[in-house]
Image (tube, rainbow, N blue to C red):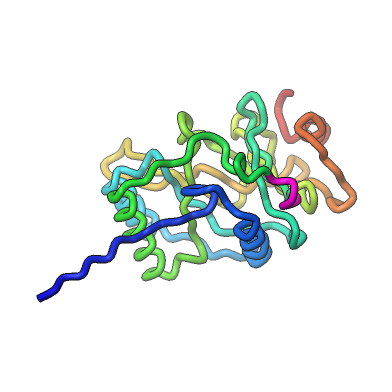
Amino acid sequence: MTVVTHRLTMDVAGLHRVPTIGDLMVSSNAYNQLPDDGEQPAVSEDNLDALAAIFCRHNMWDRFGLHLVHGHFQIAADKVMLGSAIGDGLGYWTKPTSIRDVNLDLYREGQATSWSAKDATFLQELIEYLRTHNLSKLLGLQILAPGEPGKAMVEFVLGGNCGTVMLDHEKANFQGAYRNTGWRVERSGDKPVFIELEKHAKTIRGTHQVFTDPDDKNIPDEAALRSVLKAEELVKCE
């Protein structure tokens, strides 16, 4: 009898290797097909508990989390959603960026995640669970920020060319969070569970989007973004 073994090979652009222009074009097209978070169904606690067990079984609980698959607006075909950290640990800013302006070698901040055979086993089990339970279009794998995997964040939609901002929960002003968009594993109890990590929030005026005319707005850099965050009262202190 001949036994054939199959080894899962992962090749994710921007994670395992430097992305190509073609990869970014695919990313742009994929983003425009994502549903709004309000259109996605709820994630059951049973599924979250089962997934938490998978993460802990492979000792991945402090490296990865889960993210709700969603988008917020359409972007041009020659642009890609690109995120960057906001100074002083305030959060992250993700906005449509011209693909021709992206430095492919610097596409991903920080050190690349190292992978081994056991990591492939984890991914194989995770993918199989998501497919079997019809969750592959609802949940995605999220890399946790090194050193602060438990930092709670709130997301605001600026809109259009301005993108979105993810702000430190303790530094943000918001009326209320209405949708969980990210989870991380908590191991302090009797069993590992996924807890809320990121939420989509309303502004203090109760609006879902910061700008009502986002296409007419332009935020060229972080300094301008900070001015907007202060003017729109999205931060407690600046």
Q: Is residue 130 left or right of residue 137?
A: left
In the displayed structure image, the side of residue 166 where residue 9 appears, left or right: left
> Residue 235 falls in which quadrant of the image?
top right
Going 48% across and 31% down the picture, which residue do you hit? 148
What's the magenta region?
98-102
Residue drawn at x 32%, y 47% as measured from the top left: 116
Q: How many marks?
A: 0
Say if 33 sits above or below 144 in the image.
Answer: below
Compared with residue 60, is residue 3 higher up or lower down, i.e. above or below?
below
x, y (%) of residue 174? 68, 39
**Image position, residue 78 (x, y; %):** 75, 58
Q: Position of residue 187 (x, y in %)?
A: 32, 39
> Which residue occupies the extreme bottom position in the image?
1
Q: Image quadrant for the N terminus?
A: bottom left
Q: Quadrant of the C terminus?
A: top right
Q: Nearer the viewer, residue 191 or 12?
A: 12
Question: Residue at 82% of width from left, 33% of height from top?
Answer: 224
Residue at the image position 60 percent from the left and 54 percent from the top: 20
- Is 171 in front, or is 86? 86
Q: x and y percent of residue 226 in the render?
A: 77, 30
Of helix, strand and loop, which mostly describes the magenta segment? helix
Which of the pair 111/85 is nearer the observer? 111
Residue 207 can be seen, yes or no: no
Q: In the current view of this chain or complex, which residue is farthest to the left?
A: 1
Q: Nearer the viewer, residue 124 or 73?
A: 124
Magenta-colored stretch includes residue 155: no
Asked whether the viewer can see residue 6, the reply is yes
